[in-house]
Image (cartoon, rainbow, N blue to C red):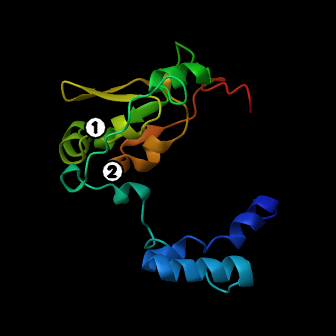
Amino acid sequence: MKKSWVYEELYKSRNFAAGFKWGFIPGTLVSGITSIFTRGKEPFTLSKHKKGFRDCDATLPAAQAKPIEYPKPDGVLSFDLLTNLQRSGTNHEEDQEPHLRIKPDLKRYPEGESLKVYAGPEQRFCPAKVYEYHENKLVINAQNCLHCKACSIKTPGQFIKWTVPEGSGGPAYSNM
């Protein structure tokens, strides 16, 4: 990776967004300097977060968050989740082990911490409705998975173990 053009391009812009942690004006100055003048040659790398910070640590408890009301899909420019899922061509072998599991040491986490404190955010951020709570019990519909891995990164406590499915299961994006 470090020898590819992708690394070179990403390295040049590594400090662009991190300056905004100090506010709009300092962020604009830092991003302007790093993108126009130094072009990635600055002798430092700014970090947006402390070392060891995980994305799931940024999830707020439900009591501290304002619910977002999204407009209903119009069927022309926007569609419901299951329609989009069907268009992705997602397919998984029926007889294989599920590739999404709750980590054994965190079995009580979904119904406990995630649902009670965070209102089960995995059922909202998953783009394919893989996670649903029925009668306060987490149901995992692994056959819908689009392999975005958001669940293993963003779920509070990172209680989901995502493994690569057997065979060629997953989305079949024909235009890629």
Question: Looking at the image, is mark 1 or mark 2 nearer the viewer?
Answer: 2
Q: Which secondary structure, mark 1?
A: loop
The quarter of the picture where the C terminus appears is top right
Using a 10 Å C-alpha cutoff, classify the residue at mark 2 as few (fewer than 14 neighbours), some (14 to 19) or many (20 or more): some
Q: What residue type is disc 2 on?
A: Gly
When the figure is inspected, residue 41 is found, relative to residue 3, above or below; the finding is below
- The quadrant holding residue 131 is top left
Residue 64 lies, with reference to residue 161, above or below; the image says below
- Where in the figure is residue 158, as x and y percent of width and height? 38, 48
Q: Which residue is located at x 52 percent, y 78 percent?
A: 27
Q: Residue 126 placed where, x, y %?
A: 43, 36
**Badge 1: residue crowd in 10 Å (few <14, some 14–19, many ≥20):** few
Residue 110 placement (x, y as % from top left): 27, 38
Sooner in the amino-acid sequence: mark 1 or mark 2: 1
Corner quadrant of residue 174: top right
**Labelled disc at residue 34:** none
| The label number, if any, that marks residue 107 in the structure image | 1
Residue at 53 percent of width and 36 percent of height: 163
The residue nearer to you, when weighing 36 against 51, is: 36
Q: Quadrant of the N terminus?
A: bottom right
**Marks 1 and 2, how far apart in space?**
11 Å
Residue 97 appears anywhere in the view: no
Q: Give the camera-side residue of 1 and 82.
A: 82
- Disc 2 marks which residue? 157
Report the front residue among 84 and 142. 84
Q: Is residue 63 left or right of residue 141?
A: left
158 displayed left or right of 148: left
